Amino acid sequence: MRKFLVILDDSRECLNAMRFASMRAEKTGGGVQILSVISPEEFNHWIGVSDIMREEARERIEAHYQVFAKWMRDKHGIAPELVIREGEAVEEILAQLHDDPSIGVLVLGAGTDRKGPGPLISQLTKSAGSLPVPITIVPGEMSRERLEAIT
């Protein structure tokens, strides 16, 4: 089964990427893999504090994931898979793409502010020619109705 890889983070545009991935998976008989990356900057503390912070970050990710997973199951009949990695976001996304050959498409949400589409899109499009899968960029301001119409 082909999977759509979508990135779970705290950005607003993450929601549209989740919507698009789940709608496309439903229509094509695919699956959704949700990747969340814990940045190493979050743990530059003493070892005991670092371990507690890492566990708290994982709990936050799991809670956030549960909201999306319930919505995907209830609305689209999709049971997403959660993957949590630690490191630099772009490096970990690329590693996940290479580690899981069942991923067929990377879905990213584009930011809407004047600074550009966001750091992930800016960095990943630089190496788009050598990626093992295509990237789908979902506009952050696209309405749910428009997403439904194009998926």
Image: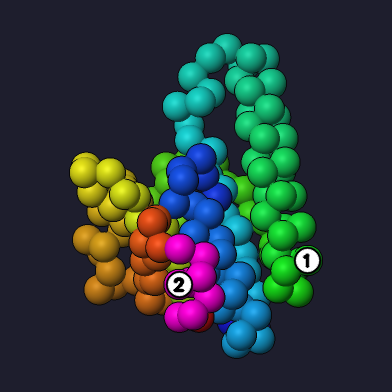
Given the image, on which type of amino acid does mark 2 rest? Answer: Arg
The image's colour scheme reads rainbow
Question: Is 93 drawn above or below residue 131 in the view shown?
Answer: above
Question: Is 113 drawn above or below residue 71 in the view shown?
Answer: above
Q: Name the residue under label 2.
A: 146
Dot 2 falls on a residue whose secondary structure is: helix
**15 with respect to 88 (left or right):** right
Given the image, on which type of amino acid does mark 1 rest? Answer: Asp
Could you say where residue 35 lies in the image, as x and y percent from the top left?
Answer: 57, 55
- Residue that appears at 49% across and 59% down: 16
Mark 2 or 1, which is nearer the eye?
2
Could you say where residue 64 lies in the image, as x and y percent from the top left?
Answer: 66, 43
- Residue that appears at 52% across and 65% down: 144
Residue range (magenta)? 143-150
Nearer the observer, 113 or 44: 113
- Check if residue 67 falls in the magenta segment: no
- Residue that appears at 46% across and 63% down: 143
Nearer the observer, 46 or 129: 129
Nearer the observer, 30 or 44: 30
Dot 1 falls on a residue whose secondary structure is: helix
Q: Mark 1 points at which residue?
A: 74
Q: How crowded is mark 2: few (under 14 residues within 10 Å), some or many (20 or more)?
A: few
- Residue that appears at 36% across and 61% down: 139
> How far apart in space, not on screen, are marks 2 and 1 (Cα)?
20 Å
Determine if residue 99 is in view: no
